[in-house]
Amino acid sequence: MIPLPALAALLLSAAAPSFVVVVDPGHGGEQEGASGPAGLREKALTLQIARRVARRLERLGAQVILTRTKDETVPLAQRAALANARQADLFLSIHLNSMPGRLGAATHGVETYFLSADATDASASAVAARENADRLAGEERDPDDPVAGILESLGDAEALDESSRLAYAVQERLVAKVKAEDRGVKQAPFYVLAGARMAAVLVEVGFISNPREGRRLAQAAYQDQVAAAIADGVAAWRRDGRSAHR
Ligand SMILES: [Zn+2]
């Protein structure tokens, strides 16, 4: 028996020297993202977790590009554009969830999203609205039609299908490994995913507004578990895609 991590490394590296992953730490710079009790900030935690995801994926033989490596402002449209320019195999945006008030303090768990024009439910719609607030003035191609980029992406059936498969693979590993509540795979109109011409998902790894989950998400050991689970999901997605195309 080959140990699982070694097998995953083998599958990712064999005949695939150019498996390219773009990892996107949500927010940064002027884009503050959500904040939580005890001064936790989403933009700082997404960068820490994204770095760990990058290291895990590199160990599996992937070439990883981060959309930012410090606390800087990166326009939403530029993030997927980078993945397109580098002909990445997948685009992975890392975020922390948040809800206002008492509900936000009580709610916890993991959600993984892929793109759609309409949100799965009211809660998914609220998440997209919060994450889309980063959009800088003049960023959309046509101010009269802000969903143009989304509709364009949805026209690519294969990328959408791969995004769905990737979302389920990541969500399944994440829930199993970190034993967080499974809030499911959902869809919503995220600007950061619009325009990506490859499998693209946005992972809400937990609630920063929940004091207990927020604290865990700031811990190195927990961040590493999250990163390992996401990397496992990517490896599974890659492996299953290959066997399906054989
Ligand atoms: Zn976010």
Image: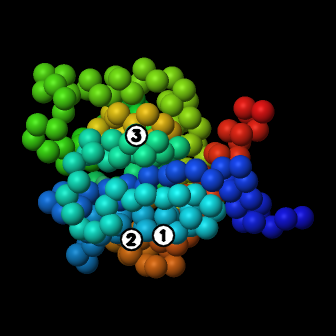
Q: CA distance from mark 3 to mark 1?
A: 23 Å
Amino acid under label 1?
Arg
Marks 2 and 3 sit apart, C-alpha to C-alpha, by 24 Å
Q: Where is residue 232 shown, x and y percent of the image?
A: 63, 58
* Residue ID at (90%, 64%): 1
Q: Quadrant of ligand 1?
A: bottom left
Quarter of the figure that contains the C terminus: top right
Mark 3 crowd level (few <14, some 14–19, many ≥20, 10 Å Cα): some
Q: Name the residue rendered at 64%, 45% in the picture.
A: 237
Q: Is residue 246 above or below residue 93?
A: above
Residue for point 51% across, 23% down: 157
Q: Is residue 132 above or below residue 119?
A: below
Residue 142, above or below 216:
above
Residue marked by disc 1: 52
SS at circle 1 = helix
Q: Residues within 10 Å of mark 2 (few under 14, many from 20)?
A: many
Amino acid type for the residue under numbered disc 2: Gln
* Disc 1 from disc 2: Cα separation: 7 Å
| Viewer-side residue, 157 vs 210 | 157
Please name the residue that numbered disc 2 is placed on.
48
Q: Is mark 1 within 8 Å of ligand 1?
A: no
Does dot 3 land on a helix, a strand or a loop?
A: helix
Q: From the image, state whether disc 2 or disc 3 is nearer to you.
A: 3
First in sequence, mark 3 or 1: give its number: 1
Labels 3, 1: front one: 3
- Pointer 2 or 3: first along the chain: 2
